[in-house]
Image (cartoon, rainbow, N blue to C red):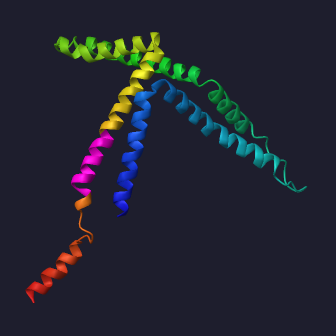
Amino acid sequence: MKTMNYSLIRILFALVIGLVLVLWPNTAASYIVITIGVAFLIPGVISLFSFFGRKRSEHEPAPRFPIEGIGSLLFGLWLIVMPEFFADVLMFLLGFILIMGGVQQIASLSMARRWTPVPGIFYLVPSLILIAGVIALFNPTGVRNTAFIIIGISSLVYSLSELINWFKFARRRPKTPVTPHDEDIEDAKIIE
């Protein structure tokens, strides 16, 4: 019964996430960056509270000021206040990485031509990677929205296939699972 409940929870989460990413990809990007900002903000706040709320004895050395906590707090606030900026920065970074990867693969194939023939089809994927990187640099918002839509559609397909599997197979699972040990006992009874 527990596995059935976990399957349904997975299906519902995948369905909701997929719908949100497909229907509102730009807003979803902002909320993901804001969530990351909150993840940076909380440890910063905790470290500051523990520093200022700590009771000090005269025999203990003075604790070090939590500079990392302040940095985490400020970075978290910055992510929360300017989510669009950071989403675009991440897309620029992704574009740069894709360009570097495409150029590196094309260069490796060109060097390989020195000792072996390299068919032109091998240049297709690195060229597509290079083009995707250039597009990401010049249109970061469009790339971000397209990526989230693709992830959302994948999430919807996963949730529907999981739901079909649940209806077809998981509901028909026997109530008491037969373990190999139980089969051995049944076999022993038959032999006697």
Specify the segment rendered in magenta.
Answer: 158-170
* Residue 1 position by quadrant: bottom left
Q: Nearer the viewer, residue 165 or 58?
A: 165
Task: Identify the residue at the far left of this view.
Answer: 191
- Residue visible at 27% across and 43% down? 161
Residue 144 is one of the magenta-drawn residues: no
- Residue visible at 29% across and 47% down? 163
Q: Nearer the viewer, residue 20 or 102?
A: 20
Task: Identify the residue at the far bottom of this view.
Answer: 192
* Position of 47 relative to 130 (above/below): below
* Position of 67 relative to 163 (above/below): above
- Horizontal and vertical percent for residue 36? 57, 35
* Residue 4 position by quadrant: bottom left
- Horizontal and vertical percent for residue 52? 82, 46
- Horizontal and vertical percent for residue 167? 25, 53
- Residue visible at 27% across and 11% down? 110
Residue 169 is one of the magenta-drawn residues: yes
- Residue visible at 86% across and 54% down? 56
Most common SS among magenta residues: helix
* Position of 45 relative to 6 (above/below): above
Screen quadrant of the C terminus: bottom left
**Relative horizontal placement of residue 93, taking residue 74 as reference (left or right):** left
- Horizontal and vertical percent for residue 103? 36, 13
Q: Nearer the viewer, residue 21 or 119?
A: 21
